[in-house]
């Protein structure tokens, strides 16, 4: 299946493809286009839009697109993914929903990746997914330790 979103990815538009590829659609193909072209290109390419306004897999209230994907594809049974969703939310929003301490660090890392000179969003995603692999491993460890809010929860 094709999935489409805005170009010049940062937090949610890197986290969502990672989540989709690992847990929803192993054969996913991602397309990144200017924001004003997402919906027309989604129709033309028969692609699923995500992380754009007014779509099912977008922000709803204070929840981010990553969380919308978790809900849509019924991945809430994995508490490590739920915790990772809270971290992504904290990095991608004002962090007032979950007050997730790790969010600020993820935001800084994502911003740094944007300045490393990758030629396009596909290259940036390929490079940055290791961060989400590591964060998911961290979340799994936190769940195993009985800390479902993470190591830095107050």
Image (cartoon, rainbow, N blue to C red):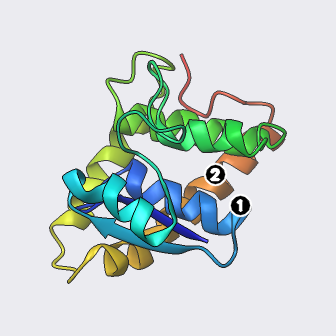
**Image position of 43 (left or right of 1):** left
Q: Quarter of the image containing the N terminus?
A: bottom right
Q: Which residue is mark 1?
A: 24
Q: Are marks 1 and 2 in contact (CB under 8 Å)?
A: no
Q: Residue at x 25, y 62 (%)?
A: 7
Q: Residue at x 20, y 60 (%)?
A: 34
Rendered location of residue 69, percent (x, y): 61, 44
Rendered location of residue 65, percent (x, y): 49, 40
Name, please, the residue furthest toward the front.
44
Callout 2: helix, strand or loop?
A: helix
Q: Earlier in the sequence, mark 1 or mark 2?
A: 1
Residue 153: numbered disc = none
Distance Cα–Cα, label 1 vs label 2: 21 Å
Q: Residue at x 69, y 36 (%)?
A: 71
**Image position of 107 (left or right of 147):** left
**Is 117 located above or below residue 8 in the figure?**
below
Q: Which residue is mark 2?
A: 138
């Amino acid at each position: 299946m094709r999935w489409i979103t805005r170009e010049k990815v940062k937090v949610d538009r890197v986290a969502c493809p990672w989540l989709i590829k690992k847990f929803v659609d192993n054969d996913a193909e991602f397309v990144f286009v200017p924001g004003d072209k997402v919906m027309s290109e989604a129709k033309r390419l028969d692609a699923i839009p995500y992380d754009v306004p007014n779509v099912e897999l977008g922000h709803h209230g204070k929840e981010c697109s990553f969380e919308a994907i978790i809900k849509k594809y019924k991945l809430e049974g994995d508490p490590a993914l739920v915790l990772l969703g809270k971290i992504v939310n904290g990095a991608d929003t004002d962090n007032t929903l979950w007050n997730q301490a790790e969010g600020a660090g993820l935001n800084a890392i994502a911003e740094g990746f944007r300045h490393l000179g990758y030629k396009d969003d596909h290259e940036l995603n390929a490079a940055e997914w290791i961060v989400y692999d590591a964060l998911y491993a961290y979340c799994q460890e936190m769940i195993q330790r009985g800390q479902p809010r993470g190591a830095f929860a107050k």
